[in-house]
Image (spheres, grey):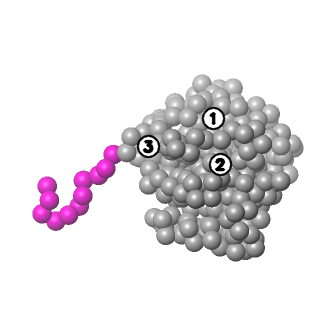
């Protein structure tokens, strides 16, 4: 028996869920801009209230580790580590893009990361190509300008192309698209659609966003395998160094 609290704050979505043995008990999410710091702790308290559980009942806390928003990651990891220290519970870290890829597979109705016949699944015009077993999954998180954080996975969540900060150009995925259909999703995919959508093997899952619910199966697996983080030394996976912008204060140069 395991009770896990999962926190996703790496993207514009602030999401928290409570799950027992891989089954979600309660889920709260917000798309409000820049609201992570104000809603996350409220969400956590509400999750336990809805489930009629105590913090002490937890077996582990899971957090989305990045890449993603620098500020969002700091908020989520700080909350997770604070709970772990206070409750003496272990920390599980889930790569944000891996969880998104798992979510893409889940949204298409593929169970246990295995392909089924998707011809009956009316998902944004991708039915017939996404049913091919060679289809790959590319979650993307918006970075800056035409840059995205992305990785490419197969149906079993094996990493085909490792996580990178990519400046997307029209030939960025030509090597993989020559042999595979690739399903793109996430905030980064939306801004890359114009560059890539003319390619017949480039497919897009619309209105897809990161969520703590996509972390649950991955968190449960890591908990069972005792794949836990060193709480004292764990830091988010930023991928890129944070660059502070010049403050916009009148009179300052």
Q: Residue at x 58, y 41 (%)?
A: 230
Q: Are marks 2 and 3 in contact (CB under 8 Å)?
A: no
> Residue at point 45% right, 46% down?
143
Instruction: Please state if 159 lies on the left or on the right of 2 as rendered.
Output: left
Compare residues 179 and 113 and report the one nearer the observer: 113
Q: Callout 3: few (<14), some (14-19), or many (20+) C-alpha neighbours within 10 Å? A: few
Of labels 1 and 2, earlier in sequence is: 2
Q: What residue did someone put label 2 on?
A: 90
Q: CA distance from mark 2 to mark 3?
A: 37 Å
Q: Which residue is mark 1?
A: 152
Q: Position of residue 130 (x, y in %)?
A: 76, 41
**Can you say whether 120 is above or below 57 in the image?**
above
Q: Can residue 111 be seen in the rendering of this structure? A: yes
Could you tell me which residue is drawn at 44 percent across and 43 percent down? 146
**Which is nearer the N-term, disc 3 or disc 1?**
3
Image coordinates of residue 4 in percent, x first then y, are 72, 56
Q: Which residues are magenta?
A: 243-253
Residue 177 falls inside the magenta stretch: no
Residue 194 place in picture, x, y as percent: 52, 45
For label 1, count other residues whose C-alpha is less than 10 Å away and answer few (under 14), some (14-19) or many (20+).
many
Local secondary structure at mark 2: loop
Label number found at residue 103: none
Residue 250 covered by magenta stretch = yes
Main secondary structure found in the magenta portion: loop
Q: Which residue is mark 3?
A: 146
């Amino acid at each position: 028996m395991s009770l896990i609290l999962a926190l996703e704050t790496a993207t514009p979505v602030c999401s928290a869920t409570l799950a027992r043995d891989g089954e979600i008990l309660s889920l709260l999410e917000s798309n409000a801009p820049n609201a992570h710091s104000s809603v996350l702790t409220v969400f956590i308290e509400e999750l336990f209230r809805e489930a009629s559980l105590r913090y002490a009942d937890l077996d582990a806390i899971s957090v989305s580790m990045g890449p993603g928003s620098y500020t969002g990651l700091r908020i989520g990891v700080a909350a997770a580590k604070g709970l772990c220290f206070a409750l003496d519970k272990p920390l599980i870290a889930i790569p944000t893009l891996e969880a998104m890829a798992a979510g893409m597979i889940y949204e298409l109705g593929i169970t246990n990361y295995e392909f089924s016949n998707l011809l009956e699944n009316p998902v944004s015009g991708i039915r017939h190509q996404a049913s091919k077993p060679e289809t790959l999954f590319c979650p993307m998180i918006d970075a800056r300008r035409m840059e995205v954080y992305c990785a490419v996975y197969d149906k079993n969540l094996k990493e085909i192309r490792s996580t990178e900060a990519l400046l997307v150009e029209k030939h960025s995925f030509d090597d993989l698209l020559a042999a595979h259909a690739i399903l793109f999703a996430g905030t980064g995919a939306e801004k890359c659609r114009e560059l890539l959508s003319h390619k017949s093997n480039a497919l897009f899952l619309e209105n897809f966003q990161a969520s703590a619910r996509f972390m649950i199966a991955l968190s449960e697996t890591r908990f069972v395998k005792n794949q836990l983080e060193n709480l004292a030394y764990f830091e988010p996976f930023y991928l890129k160094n944070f660059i502070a912008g010049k403050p916009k204060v009148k009179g300052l140069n």
